[in-house]
Amino acid sequence: MEDGPRGAILQRDKETYAIVPRTPAGIVAPEDLENIVKVVRRHAIPVIKITSGQRMALVGIKEDEVDSVWSELGMTVGEATAPCVHYVQACPGTAVCKYGKQDSMGLGLELEGMYQDMNLPAKLKMGVSGCPRCCGESYVRDIGVWGSGKGWTVIFGGNSGGRPRIGDVVAKDLDKEQVLDLVRRLLEYYRSKGKQGERTARFMERIGLDTLKADVLAFVPYLPLEETRPR
């Protein structure tokens, strides 16, 4: 992150900043929305931008007002460049969507709460989808999960950036507790083996799926042998 006020990103004009309050799984309480509007008007913040990660960027804040804006918002920082979990993107899932097969918002909230403070080699994004339509963009996230009538599929090493990569499917038909356990194993392995600044897509290109199977998946007791055996 650029040098400057806490939790702020220097903008193109080199004078103003943007901040991104954390909105887990894209969910915002009414009282937070009301307070955001009050703060934006009070400080004459010119732009509120909905980001691809289901967050709101408040853009065009004067440097000497950033700390006051954070204090008045009373919300935590949604990281934008730090080497940690930036966000968990989640579709509505079974909460409201007629296509939903699994509770993607519930799982997304749980994953974000568990891993938002975890230090990692590089920034990391998760996508959780409640059905095979993958509205949570699960195949192009560092950690991707999507649901079917049989359970959850877990994907690792996706990226949608300048060098896009479809993530590797590492497990299918899991229940929620198994997903939480497998995500923990994957993140701990990536944290211990990844190079500084290396996103999971580049990490997987370097080590290969067979190495991940041998080092991680082979020790997961609930995965079938055919899914954990190197090719």
Image: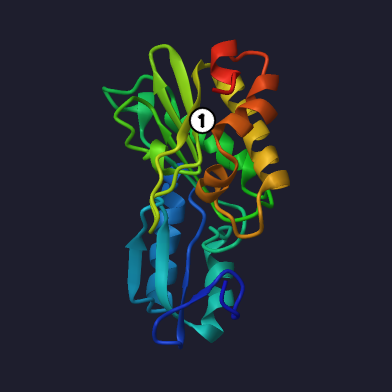
Decide: is 186 above or below 230: below
In the displayed structure image, the side of residue 231 where residue 27 appears, left or right: left
Judge by depth and name the residue closer to the eye, 130 or 60.
Answer: 130
How many numbered marks does the figure carry?
A: 1
Q: How is the image coloured?
A: rainbow
Q: Residue at x 27, y 23 (%)?
A: 99
**Pointer 1 local density, CA inside 10 Å: few below 14, some 14–19, many at least 20:** many
**Residue at point 40% right, 58% down?**
34
Image location (x, y in percent) of residue 104: 43, 30
- Quadrant of the drawing holding the N terminus: bottom right
Quarter containing the C terminus: top right
> Which element carries disc 1, helix, strand or loop?
helix
Left or right: where 137 falls relative to 6: left
- Residue at horizontal 45 percent and vertical 83 percent from the top: 16
* Relative height, residue 8 to residue 146 (above, below): below
**In this rendering, would 216 be left or right of 160?**
right
- Report the residue marked by disc 1: 107
| Residue 47 seen by the camera | yes
Relative placement, left or right, of 186 versus 165 is: right
* Above or below, comparing residue 176 to residue 203 in the picture: above
| Rendering quarter of residue 45 | bottom left
- Viewer-side residue, 12 vs 71: 12
In the image, is residue 57 above or below residue 217?
below
Q: Residue furthest front?
A: 231
Name which quarter of the figure residue 60 lies in.
Answer: bottom left
* Identity of the residue furthest to the left in this view: 98
User: 162 or 19, which is in the foreground?
Assistant: 162
**Residue 222, horizontal then vertical, whole percent:** 62, 13
Q: Would residue 216 be visible to someone looking at this image?
A: no
Q: Position of residue 72 (x, y in %)?
A: 54, 68
Front-lying residue, 208 or 130: 208
Residue type of the residue flagged with mark 1 = Leu
